[in-house]
Amino acid sequence: MNGGIELQKQKKNKRLTITLWTAGSILFLLLGLLIFVNYYIDRSLPVTSGTISLNGLSDVVEVVRDKDGVPHIQAQNDKDLYMAQGYVQAQDRLFQMDLSRRQASGRLSEVVGEKAVDRDKFFRTFGLRRAAEVSFTAYPDEAKQLLEWYADGVNAYMEEAADKGRLPVEFTLLGYKPEEWTPIDSLTIGKYMAFDLGGHWQGQAFRYWALENLPKEKAYDLFPSYPDGAPTILSDIGESQVDLEKSFASAVIPPEFNGSNNWVVSGEKTENGKPLLADDPHLSLGTPSIWYQMHLESPDVNVSGVIFAGIPGIILGHNEQIAWGVTNTGPDVQDLYIEKRNEEDPDLFLYDGKWEKATIVQEPIKVKDSETIPYTVTITRHGPVISEFAHQQESGQVMAMRWTALDPSLELSAIININRANNWAEFEEALKDFHVPTQNFVFASKDGTIAYKANGKIPIRKKGDGLLPVPGWDPDYEWQGFIPFDELPKVINPEAGFLATANNKVVTDDYPYHISHHWAQPYRYMRISEYLKDKNKLTLKDMENLQMDQKNLHAREFVPMLTGDLDKGTMTAEQSDALEILNSWNYLDDKDSAAPLIFHQWMNEISTGLFQKEVPEEMMKLFEGRQSVVDELIRKAHAGKESKWFEDRGGYESFVAASLTKALGELEEAYGTSMDGWEWGMYHKVYFEHPLSSASPILEKFLNAKEPIPVGGSRVTVEAASYNDEGIVNHGASWRFVIDTADMDNGYHIVGPGQAGHYKSEWYQNQIDAWVKGEYHKTSLEKSGGDQLIMKPE
C-alpha cells in the first residue's frame, strides 16, 4: 500500500514537473515573442541622430529635432532642403501620408478590403486625383521641380526602410508595402483638403429634397435665407426624378464645423507697439495630428510653421519678416446640375437643345482578398455625375457637380512665394495662385502692417445663387467666371486696431458679389471681437488666453430666452432646479460646471426632436446649417412668430419644456439624480484616436496612449471643441499658434496630440495635456539644441 502511495506521489510530482516546464516554456516563448515584437517595432523608430548618406543630395544637410520633436532642417540649397523635408516627414508620418493619398485617390479598398468600396467609389467619382493630375501640368517648372525633390526624399526613406525592415508597423498589420511617392500624391492630398473644407453641394441636395418631400412652408424654414429664386429654378427643372435618399446615403460629408479662428492686432493696441497674430484651424482631431510642424532654412527661405503630411513647404506660420494664418471662408463653390440623360444612349446629355457626349473614365477598384470591381465615372460638361456612385438611377435624370477644386489650381506656387515674402505686397501677390479652398488670410509684419483678405476662386453665376440644384441643360445657369482678384474682400490697417475671422459673414449686404449663404454661427467671432475691443496693451499671453476662452455667447443669448418662455406654474421640481443652475451660470463652458451639460443637452434635444420624425437619417447628414436654422426658429417663436415645426410638436413652449424634461431624464440616467454632481467634463472629453485603434482592444491600448480627458469649451466657444454623439471631442483646434512680431524669431505652438506617428516615440502623444491646458511650446528660427542628424551625399 505504501508503495502504491509512493508511486502516486512520483506520478503527481512528474505531472507537476511537466506542467511547470510547459508553463515555463510558454512563458519563455511569450517573453521571447514580446522581446522580438518590441525589437521589431523599435526598429521602425526614426533615426534622429548621427550621420546618414542620402543619394541625390548635393551638399550636407543638418536636421535638429528640438525638445518638442520639431525638425529644423538647414540646407545649402533648395533641392537639398525639400528632399530632406520629404525624408523627414516620411520618417515621422509615412503611414499617415500613405493613408491620406489612398483615401483621396479612392484606393483604400486595396489595403482594408470591401468595407471601403463605397468610400472609394465616392472619391473616384469626385476625381480629386484626376484634378491633381490636371493641376500638375499647369504648374510652372519651379513648382514641378520642388515636388520632384520632395518625392525623391520620401522615396529615399521608403527604400531605406523597406531594405532594412524598418517600415512603420501599421504596414505589417495591414499586410502591404507603400508604393513609390509621386508629385501627384502630394497634390491629391492638397485637393482633399479643399474637399474637407467644403463647398455646400450637400446643402443644395438637402434643400431640393425638402422642397420635394415637405410642405413648402416647412421646407423654406430650413433654408439659410428666403430663396427668392427658388420658384423659377424649380419651374425650370420640372418634376424631380433623382432619388436623393438612395443616391447620397453613403456620401462622405466633411464635418460641418471645419473652420477656424484667426485674428491680428495692430501695434496701437499692444503693450510693445508691435502687431500680434493668432491662428487656430479647426479640423478633425486624431493620432497623428493632421498637421506636421517644421522649420525650413536655406539661402532662399527661413520659414517655420505647419504643413499637411505629404506636402512640401510651410502653409501656415512665419518667417523673419511676416506671419500669417487662415480660417475657412466657406463660399458657395460647388453647384449641383440636374442633367437629362438620353434614353437610348446613356453617355449623351442634353445641353442647349442638343445632345452632348459625356466623358467616360474607367476607374477599376482593386479590393483586398476579393476581385477587382469594374467602375466607371461619367463626366458631363459641368463635372462628374455624383448621384450614381452608390445607386444607379432608374430615371433619365442625374446630378453632376461643378466645383472650383476640379479645375487646375496652383496652391503650391502660392505656398513657395508666401514662404519667401517679406511684406504685404509680396504676400498678396503670392495669393494670386491660391485658388482653392477659399480662405480668410490674416497677416502681420515686422514693419507694423496688419491685413486681411478672403482669397480664392469664387464663382459668378449668370442665374441661380447656390441654394438649389439647377438645370444642366439650360445655358442660363452657367458660371460667368470668378470674382476678380482685386475685388475680393480685403482690409489693411483698420481703424479698429484689429482684424478677426471665425467663419462668420465677412462682407456687408452691399458687397456686389455673392459669396455664400452659409456662415458659421456668429458667437466665436462675437467673443473674439468683444475681447479685443475691450482691451488695450495686449500681450502674447492675452492671445493665448483668448484661444482658450470658454465664454459661450450662444448660451448667453438663448438661456434667458428659453428659461423666460417656460411656464413657471407647470414646472417640475427637476426643471426648476435645472433653470436655477442655468440662470446663475456665468456662461463659461467649464468642464467642472453642470450648466453647460444641461444647456447643450437641451439644445440637442430641441434640434433632434424638431426634425427626426420628418427628415430621414440619410438626409439629416446633408442638413447643412441645422443649428443656425434651429436658432432662427427659436428667435421667431420667442418673438411671437411660431413656425409650423413647433406647431406640429404641440407648440413652442410645450415643446421646449418637453425637450428639457427629456434632456434631464437622459442626464439623470447617465450621471445620477443630483444635479450638483453633474459636470460638463463627464460627457465632454477629448480623445485623439489612431485610425487603426478600433480594429482590436490590443491596438487601442497601444495606439491610443491616453484615455479620454475631460475638457472645456464647445462648438460655439473660441476654445473650439466639437464632439460626437458620445461626447468625444474629435474636432477642434488642430494647431494653435501665436506670435509677437516684435520677436519674429520665436513662434508659440500646440500641435495635438504630438509630432510623431510612431507610438513608441516620446513625441507621439506628448502634447495632449498641453492641448487641454493651453500650454504652448516655443519654436525658434535660431539654432536649436536637440537630436542632430547629419545627412551627407552618398
Image (cartoon, rainbow, N blue to C red):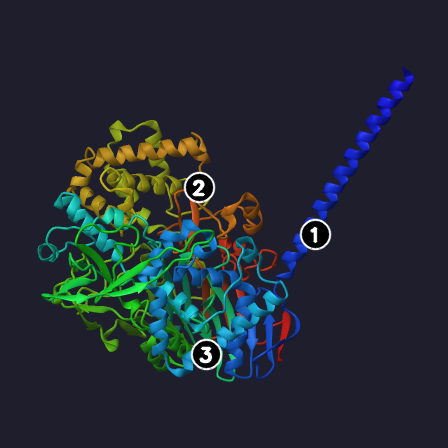
x, y percent for residue 137: 35, 77
Chain-order first, disc 1 or disc 2: 1
Q: Give, as a three-letter code, the residue at label 1.
A: Ile
Q: Residue beneath label 1, please?
A: 35
What residue does disc 3 label? 146
Question: Is 519 in front, or is 25?
Answer: 25
* Left or right: where 68 falls relative to 228: right
Of the numbered discs 3 and 1, the one sitting upstream in the chain is 1
Q: Position of residue 545 (x, y in %)?
A: 45, 59
Disc 3 secondary structure class: helix
Query: Circle 1 sits in a helix, a strand or a loop, which is it?
Result: helix
Three-letter amino acid code of the residue under disc 2 = Tyr
Q: Earlier in the sequence, mark 3 or mark 2?
A: 3
Task: Name which residue type carries label 3.
Answer: Leu
Q: Nearer the viewer, mark 1 or mark 2?
A: 1
Q: Which residue is mark 2?
A: 683
Percent position of residue 774, x then y:
49, 57
Question: Residue 232's quadrant in the figure?
Answer: bottom left
Q: Residue at x 37, y 47 (%)?
A: 587
Looking at the image, the residue that sits furthest to the top is: 1
Mark 1–mark 2 Cα distance, whole angstroms, equals 39 Å
Q: Quick check: 457 left or right of 682? A: left
Q: Does the CB distance between marks 3 and 1 fall below 8 Å?
A: no
Q: Residue at x 49, y 51 (%)?
A: 689
Disc 3 to disc 1, how far (Cα)?
42 Å
The answer to whether residue 717 shows anywhere in this view is no
